[in-house]
Image (spheres, grey):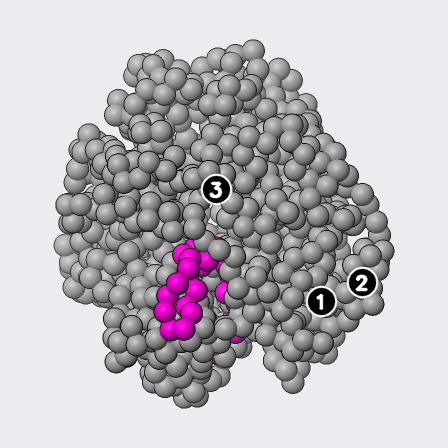
């Protein structure tokens, strides 16, 4: 099956729908309103052991509205865009606003902050929703996985997906913005086995532009190499040592930090970096920056969830906090201007004193290289950090053997100050882009014998 | 035909101008290409939530979602398509896309639909309509006031009330024809306390598939006091130990151990594919003889309970492990058919826009005969873990973690100082063989569990009695 779709052709219709919803809100008595309408069309093809397993099509349209009745707010959303449902949804939002209480911080962002320009960020690269092409890519990917290592004995499958989406946001300042994006991805999950049991791992590629995806064979090969490398893992002895986070594992570290700098965590006093503006909280070589307008990236956007123009900024510059991550609401709560981050961050990059991966291993000498984190053991209020970990033991500055069933523990405040260096290997496959990160010391626990 | 089915048809088919005959014709078309099973799933879901912060209810939200999912199963293949609007064109389009998994063909006569008559295991009313807005807002305010009244170290109180009501209708070419009306309510209280430079958080929540009116009169106050208690305990917490040691797990919510250590590994899809550490081990000893583990979707009004699953199969108590011996897996229709097993009522989907797969309902361990006090006394040095944040498992290696948010040291057989939150890590099949004592105090969690798998979230329940695990690795900082 092949469908030539271009969701940009829906932008006009979705904008018209957003305008109709705004008119409805006004007619029913809303003093101010904001609305978002989104449509997403896509295809997923999954193969397993050389056979087509799943073919899935989706086409979703939904809208959400927030209305303000004085300083009271109500919100409602629906996936039903019939006239009756629009009417009911808007009425429900207003009904809720009658029962919430006044909050002087509620309301739209200031009119003057609305994004004036919506530059083309190179986020739309459509390809036909073609099941045969997706099937061929998934089959080639998984086949290469099996061919790479004879210990790859099983598979959870390879999956090729492509989708197009269009999001329209408007508010009663008269702002109306539309953003159409495409997403293409290919992933593969493999299982390897030897005399000591089974291990799984995966690899994936994803990009807005299909031409920039890794080749299917490369994805399959990397998935196989990563999976086979985990076979016959050992347990580590309990003690303290340097810990090197892989770029994928380090992504969560940057996530914890930006979470702690978010306006919500600050005004709720639920942050381990509470009131840290201008304080030195990290190694002096570390930077945490946002680049929302990078062309072609997964997190790129020219306006935020309030319609405010996004802007490049440093949250942490040379180890010191220079900005919180704020929306119009959380900014008002803290007496600060919005930073254009309603709905979150757009392309967050962690950088620092950079070394090649091999040099990082040499620097740590003996310790744990973590490629996989498990669990929910991070306390955002205190910074207490305790996670399950798997990866490789490093001995004499080189990878020695795979490790599993370990935990790593410390406190994020200490970890940030103990970043010795970062790798030259940032993983650009997401909204949070991190390289390898070397932490000077953490407590590692495991059931292994001490050496 | 059950009243539930007529009601669901009135909600889901009639407004779209669709008749049962239209749906049956669509099913015929779904399997016209020779598929083994065609299925239509229609869903209408309304949700309402209220959030309190700084002593006032400042946010409220309503959502209405309707849609249909069409599925064609052929051997190990699945074709699926979703439409967010229930209309004749949406149905036709979804059917054509789903049946493209098998190529060419026309229409086929399908088995006559036979309605499933299962006795409801939970309340059937819409919880949103059960109480006026003012009364709902008052529940949140009561929780806030109770938390602030309890201790002057309470700095922040956040309360959230979530109410859901789902009407589903499923019909399939194997004759399945079932409907359900599913309420789901939940009240959460989280607090921040501070003393000097130290800040801590505490959380308590509860709910189930039941009316808001069925909870105890003091429900909001009880949750608030529990949240404050947890936070205050942690103000005094010392560093957690690091390394392998004995752990006593409190009854109830710590049953998340079972969910991670054995539950996911016993889902039928992983075992058909041979990707679980428990694959091909039925009849083998996979846990100590003290352990009998059951998944039961029929427990009255629990968060994980369902009268019928999302494929229309009535739920049942499914014995997974009996006296340590692996007895069976949890199955949906696809995996049951492919492995010659019976469907167990575990076919669940997050929504019409997701495919069903084998999922847990309420998973718990049967009580043993030990007095909980004896279990703690039997542990000279270790950790007593009372509350957990959540867990995760790698079903292939069996490796799992769960993260304690309230735990204490056990010293000389006595519970002593609270310790900071720590992650516990182990291997499911290994840890279960190290369960050496099981208490007589089975209890179920208060109703806050959410289980994620393949990007789909569904509400679940867990439970267990007090347990002693002889050795598990604790991820603290005090080496």
What is the crowding at mark 2: few (fewer than 14 residues within 10 Å), some, or many (at least 20)?
A: some
In the picture shown, does residue B447 fall above or below B56?
below
Question: In which quarter of the view is residue B341 placed?
Answer: bottom left
| Residue nearer the viewer, A119 or A240 | A240
Indicate which label's residue lies in the foreground, 2 or 3.
3
Q: Marks 3 and 1: in contact by CB < 8 Å?
A: no
User: Which dot marks residue A392?
Assistant: 1
Q: Chain of mark 2?
A: A
Q: Is residue A120 left or right of residue B45?
A: right
Q: Secondary structure at mark 1?
A: strand
What is the crowding at mark 3: few (fewer than 14 residues within 10 Å), some, or many (at least 20)?
A: few
Q: Which residues are magenta?
A: B404-429
User: Which dot marks residue A365?
Assistant: 2
Q: Are marks 2 and 3 on the same chain?
A: no
Where, quadrant-wise, is the C terminus of chain B in this rendering? bottom right
Q: Is residue A100 left or right of residue B7?
A: right
Residue matched to label 3: B198
> Of label 1 and label 2, which has the lower sequence position?
2
Q: Secondary structure at mark 3?
A: strand
Q: Is residue A277 magenta?
A: no
Q: Position of residue A169 (x, y in %)?
A: 50, 25
């Amino acid at each position: 099956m092949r469908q030539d779709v271009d969701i940009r052709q829906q932008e006009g219709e979705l904008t018209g729908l957003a305008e109709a919803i705004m008119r409805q809100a006004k007619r029913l008595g809303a003093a101010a309103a904001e609305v978002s309408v989104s449509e997403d069309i896509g295809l997923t093809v999954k193969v397993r052991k050389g056979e087509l397993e799943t073919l899935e099509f989706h086409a979703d349209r939904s809208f959400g509205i927030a209305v303000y009745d004085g300083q009271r707010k109500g919100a409602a959303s629906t996936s039903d865009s019939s006239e009756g449902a629009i009417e009911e949804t808007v009425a429900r939002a207003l009904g809720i606003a009658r029962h919430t209480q006044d909050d002087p911080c509620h309301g739209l962002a200031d009119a003057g902050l609305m994004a004036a320009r919506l530059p083309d960020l190179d986020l739309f690269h459509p390809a036909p929703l073609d099941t045969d092409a997706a099937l061929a890519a998934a089959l080639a990917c998984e086949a290469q996985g099996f061919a790479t290592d004879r210990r790859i004995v099983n598979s959870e499958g390879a999956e090729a997906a492509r989708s197009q989406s269009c999001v329209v946001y408007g508010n009663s300042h008269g702002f109306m913005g539309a953003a159409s994006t495409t997403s293409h991805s290919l992933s593969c999950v493999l299982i390897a086995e030897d005399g000591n049991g089974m291990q799984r791992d995966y690899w994936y590629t994803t990009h807005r532009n299909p031409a920039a995806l890794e080749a299917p064979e490369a994805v399959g090969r990397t998935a196989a190499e990563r999976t086979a490398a985990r076979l016959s893992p050992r347990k580590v002895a309990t003690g303290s040592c340097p810990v090197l986070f892989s770029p994928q594992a380090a992504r969560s570290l940057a996530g914890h930090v930006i979470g702690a700098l978010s306006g919500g965590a600050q005004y709720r006093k639920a942050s381990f970096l509470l009131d840290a503006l201008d304080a030195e909280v990290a190694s002096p070589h570390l930077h945490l920056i946002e680049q929302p307008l990078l062309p072609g990236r997964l997190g790129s956007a020219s306006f935020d969830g309030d319609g405010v123009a996004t802007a490049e900024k440093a949250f942490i510059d040379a180890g010191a906090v220079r900005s919180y991550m704020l929306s119009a609401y959380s900014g008002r709560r803290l007496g600060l201007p919005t930073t254009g981050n309603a709905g979150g961050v757009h392309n967050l990059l962690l950088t620092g004193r950079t070394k090649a991966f091999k040099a990082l291993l040499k620097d740590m000498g003996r310790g744990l290289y973590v490629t996989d984190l498990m669990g929910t053991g991070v306390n955002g209020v205190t910074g207490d950090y305790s996670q399950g970990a798997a990866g490789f033991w490093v001995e004499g500055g080189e990878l020695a053997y795979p490790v599993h069933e370990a935990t790593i523990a410390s406190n994020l405040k200490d970890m940030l100050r103990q970043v010795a260096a970062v790798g030259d290997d940032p993983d650009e496959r997401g909204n949070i882009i991190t390289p390898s990160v070397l932490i000077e010391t953490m407590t590692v626990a495991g059931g292994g014998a001490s050496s | 035909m059950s009243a539930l089915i007529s009601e669901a048809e009135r909600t889901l088919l009639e407004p779209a101008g669709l008749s049962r005959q239209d749906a049956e014709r669509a099913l015929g078309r779904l399997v016209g290409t020779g598929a083994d099973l065609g299925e239509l799933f229609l869903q209408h879901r309304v949700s309402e939530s209220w959030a309190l912060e700084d002593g006032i209810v400042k946010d409220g939200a309503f959502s209405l979602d309707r849609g249909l999912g069409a599925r064609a199963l052929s051997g190990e293949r699945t074709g699926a398509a979703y439409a967010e609007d229930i209309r004749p064109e949406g149905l036709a389009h979804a059917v054509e896309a789903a049946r493209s998994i098998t190529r060419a063909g026309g229409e086929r006569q399908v088995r006559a639909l036979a309605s499933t008559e299962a006795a409801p295991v939970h309340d059937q009313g819409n919880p949103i309509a059960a109480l006026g807005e003012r009364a709902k807002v008052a529940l949140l305010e009561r929780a806030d006031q109770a938390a602030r009244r309890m201790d002057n170290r309470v700095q922040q109180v956040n309360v959230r009330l979530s109410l859901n009501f789902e009407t589903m209708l499923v019909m399939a070419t194997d004759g399945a024809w079932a409907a359900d009306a599913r309420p789901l309510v939940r009240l959460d209280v989280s607090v921040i306390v501070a003393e000097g430079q130290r800040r801590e958080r505490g959380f308590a929540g509860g709910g189930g598939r039941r009316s808001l009116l069925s909870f105890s009169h003091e429900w909001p106050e009880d949750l608030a006091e529990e949240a404050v208690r947890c936070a205050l305990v942690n103000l005094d917490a010392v560093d957690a130990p690091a390394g392998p040691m004995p752990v006593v797990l409190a009854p109830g919510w710590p049953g998340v151990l079972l969910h991670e250590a054995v539950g996911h590994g016993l889902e039928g899809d992983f075992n058909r594919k041979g990707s679980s550490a428990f694959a091909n081990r039925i009849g083998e000893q996979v846990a100590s003889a003290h352990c009998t583990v059951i998944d039961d979707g029929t427990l009255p009004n629990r968060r994980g309970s369902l009268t019928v699953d999302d494929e229309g199969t009535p739920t049942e108590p499914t014995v997974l492990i009996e006296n340590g011996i692996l007895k069976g897996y949890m199955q949906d229709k696809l995996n049951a058919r492919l492995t010659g097993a019976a469907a167990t009522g575990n076919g669940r989907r997050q929504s019409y826009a997701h495919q069903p797969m084998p999922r847990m309902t309420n998973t718990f361990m049967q009580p043993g005969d030990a007095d909980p006090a004896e279990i703690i006394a039997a542990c000279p040095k270790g950790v007593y873990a009372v509350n957990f944040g959540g867990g995760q498992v790698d079903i292939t290696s069996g490796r799992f973690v769960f993260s304690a948010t309230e735990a204490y040291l056990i010293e000389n057989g006595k519970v002593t100082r609270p310790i900071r939150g720590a992650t516990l890590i182990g291997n499911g099949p290994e840890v279960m063989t190290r369960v050496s004592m099981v208490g007589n105090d089975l209890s179920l969690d208060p109703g806050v569990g959410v289980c994620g798998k393949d990007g789909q979230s569904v509400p679940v329940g867990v439970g267990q009695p007090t347990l002693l695990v002889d050795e598990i690795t604790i991820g603290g900082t005090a080496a």
